[in-house]
Image (cartoon, rainbow, N blue to C red):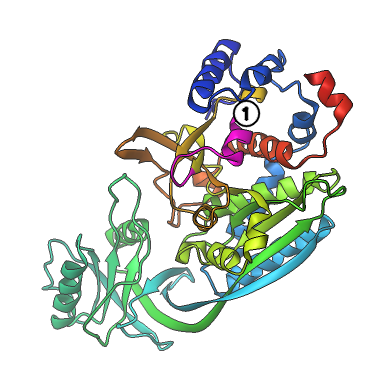
Amino acid sequence: MVVKNKKLVKRIVSTTLAVSIAFGSLGYAAGFENVLANGKSGYSQDQKVVARVNAERAIEHVRYLSEEIGTRPGGLEAEHIAADYIAKEFKSFGYDVDYQYFPVGDQFIANVSFDNGTVWELAAAPNGKISDEAVTAEVVSVENNDFSNVDGKIALLPRASTVADYRTQVNDAVAEGAVGVILQSLVGSRGNFGQTFNPNLTTPVDVPVYGASYIHGEWLKEKLANGPVEVSLTAKHHSNLQSVNVIATKKAKNRNNDGKTVILGAHHDSVVGAPGANDNASGVGLMLELARVYQGYNTDKDVRFIAFGSEERGLLGSRHYVNQLSQEERDQIEAVFVPDMVATSYEKAENLYAMTVDGSRNTVTDSTVAAGARLGNSDILPGRFGSSDHVPFHNAGIPAALFIWMGIDSWDPLIYHIEKVYHTPQDTIADNISTERMQSALDIIGSGLFDVVRKEVPALEKKNK
């Protein structure tokens, strides 16, 4: 797929004018004048980043996290393995690294095992049967809530649209003799495929009840079309879990900015059942690649790289990080850059957005939109979105923005396109990662971030002006 990355000059002019109108006069026109004929910025600080960042290196981190480790639910062993991998990479770049642990409660994880050795990770209902002792039976697909053939079988059924209705489905299946229930999530309101979920039951039942993603259900139906399918169901209650933030710090060479700190942070966990290549191994891969490039450069401000844990469980890692900061420490944070889902190949997610919670501009949005103008890259646009690790920082009065590829049809009401496979087993490199879009995000975020933290070189600055 060809991604809009290096545009023709006339496209850059229109983008730069639009940015100037939206954000006021911030020197973007001067940035445009320094776009070279080859579409690269004439500013040497941009070239320090753009000439060195490499999407393939970033995607190698995505590969390790999503394929070698796989699903990384908050608080479970795989998330901690991912944290150790990230810490090892930071240390290899020469950074000081700290672990910050915090409690995240319980997880109910289910496994569906097939005769050929395949195992699917799903989410289990806490009020269903949670046991290492397998329930093994043939699967039957239930259509139109007809439970006449479920006696002694595991019922696969499309979940009803409301919690009350799918509770009725479960009770009806159990009443007719089902020894297990797999509820299949359906396609969401934005066309995205439904994810795994913990069914919310008010009445306990003595059979396993699992919440499967849409594609899990479709794959199971395909198998059933070729003959009988027998599976084994097991589940485990993981209690008193701890998740972890991994924090790497690059100290300023010359502290002449009152101890200011700039943060680049990305969450390293995934939802149950999803390998999380784009959400959010892509953000971690981008962060690690920028950490590699920045290691040799002097900065006037401390740069803190943070891999947040348990974002998918309610922004728990970033909330914990912000909550433990003193007011003085909060005041020292100048900007927070949060890459989350920065490499999707989904064709309708046409732009990389710098999103603030309320749509206001700040250091993060200004620096990256300006970098896009200097680079001749019209992928980047400002916007508003309130669902990622930038939120706790915003709520604490700290300038922050989320970076995410989306397609926006309308801001009022918000109508947007996000990749169909996020939070599903199909969030893989093969199905959902674009090298071109990762490179665009590296160029823009890397250049904008560097412009905020770099050590000023007066003679060079004067020459460029």
Asked if one can make out residue 272 in the rendered structure from this viewpoint, the answer is no
Q: Which of the two residues, 134 or 204, is positioned nearer the viewer here?
A: 204
The picture places residue 290, in percent across and down from the top left corner, at 72, 45
Relative side of 281 to 405, left or right:
right
Relative side of 361 to 187, left or right:
right
Q: Report if residue 366 lies within the magenta region.
A: yes
Q: Residues within 10 Å of mark 1 (few under 14, many from 20)?
A: many
The picture places residue 254, in percent across and down from the top left corner, at 87, 47
The picture places residue 401, in percent across and down from the top left corner, at 54, 45
Q: Report if residue 260 lies within the magenta region.
A: no
* 141 shown above or below 460: below
Q: Which residues are magenta?
A: 356-372
Based on the displayed image, in which of its 4 quarters is residue 130 positioned?
A: bottom left
Three-letter residue code for mark 1: Ala
Q: Which of the two residues, 104 or 6, is positioned nearer the viewer here?
A: 104
Q: Quadrant of the C terminus?
A: top right
* 281 shown above or below 234: above
Q: Please give the name of the residue rendered at 55% of the width and 25% of the height, measured from the top-left corner.
A: 378
Relative side of 387 to 87, left or right:
left
Quick one: SS at disc 1? helix
Q: Please give the name of the residue rendered at 22% of the width and 67% of the height, measured from the top-left corner.
A: 163
Residue assigned mark 1: 370
* 368 shown above or below 130: above
**Image label count:** 1
Q: Which of the two residues, 408 or 156, is positioned nearer the viewer here?
A: 408
